C-alpha cells in the first residue's frame, strides 16, 4: 500500500473517532447553555445568547496572560472564516481583571468575531470554567453540545470536524 494511502486511512479513522466521541458527548451534554449579556469590547453595545440563536457557536473563555489562548485566537478566526457563511460564529469572553490588558493584547491581532468583557467573572461561574482556555460548542438551539479545554496544535482540525457535524445535523 502506498505511504500516503496509509496516512489517508489513518486520517479517516481519526475523523471517525472524533465524530463518534462527539456524538456520545453531544448526547450527554445536550442542555441549554446559560444565558448572559455582556458588553462587546469597545463597540458600545451588549451581546447575549439570543443574538446568536440559530447559529452554531464556539463560546470561548480566554485571558491575555494565557499562552494557549494566544494560540487559539487566530485559529478561531480561521475557523470562523471557513464556516461563517454556513451559520457558524465565534464569541469570545475575555476574563482579564483589566479591560486595558485585553485591549493591549488584541491591539495587533486581526480578530473579526465579537470579544466580550466579563469584569465581574459571573459568566465563567455559570459555565463551570475551571481553566483557560475553555470553550463550549452550542448548537443552533443554544444547547451545549461539546466542551474544549486548552488549545494545542492539531485542535483546529478536530474542532472543524465537530463544527461540520453540528452544521450538517441541523440542516436536516
Image: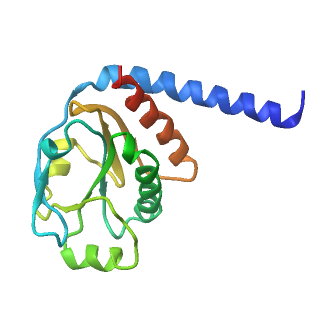
Q: Position of residue 25 (x, y in %)?
A: 38, 25
**Does residue 131 lie above or below 1 as drawn?**
below
The quadrant where residue 27 appears: top left
Q: Position of residue 99 (x, y in %)?
A: 19, 74
Q: Position of residue 65 (x, y in %)?
A: 35, 70
**Does residue 110 lie above or below 89 as drawn?**
below
Viewed as shown, does residue 21 lie left or right of 126?
right
Comparing 54 with 16, the one in front is: 54
Q: Quadrant of the N terminus?
A: top right
Q: Residue at the location (19% across, 38% down)?
A: 53
Comparing 164 with 148, the one in front is: 164
The quadrant where residue 94 appears: bottom left
The quadrant where residue 16 appears: top right
Q: Residue at the location (31% across, 64% down)?
A: 63
Viewed as shown, does residue 77 lie left or right of 28?
right
- Tell how many labels: 0
Q: Is residue 68 visible?
A: yes
Outermost residue, front direction? 85
Amino acid at each position: 500500500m502506498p505511504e500516503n494511502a496509509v496516512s489517508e486511512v489513518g486520517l479517516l479513522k481519526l475523523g471517525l473517532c472524533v465524530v463518534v466521541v462527539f456524538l456520545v458527548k453531544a448526547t450527554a451534554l445536550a442542555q441549554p447553555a446559560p444565558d448572559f449579556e455582556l458588553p462587546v469590547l469597545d463597540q458600545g453595545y451588549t451581546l447575549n445568547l439570543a443574538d446568536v440563536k440559530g447559529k452554531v457557536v464556539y463560546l470561548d473563555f480566554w485571558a491575555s496572560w494565557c499562552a494557549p489562548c494566544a494560540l487559539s485566537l487566530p485559529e478561531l478566526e480561521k475557523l470562523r472564516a471557513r464556516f461563517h457563511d454556513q451559520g457558524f460564529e465565534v464569541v469570545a469572553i475575555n476574563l482579564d481583571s483589566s479591560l486595558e490588558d485585553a485591549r493591549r493584547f488584541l491591539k495587533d491581532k486581526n480578530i473579526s468575531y465579537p470579544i466580550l468583557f466579563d469584569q465581574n467573572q459571573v459568566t465563567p461561574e455559570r459555565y463551570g470554567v475551571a481553566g483557560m482556555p475553555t470553550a463550549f460548542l452550542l448548537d443552533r438551539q443554544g444547547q451545549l453540545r461539546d466542551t474544549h479545554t486548552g488549545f494545542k496544535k492539531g485542535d483546529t482540525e478536530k474542532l472543524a470536524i465537530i463544527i461540520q457535524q453540528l452544521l450538517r445535523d441541523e440542516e436536516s
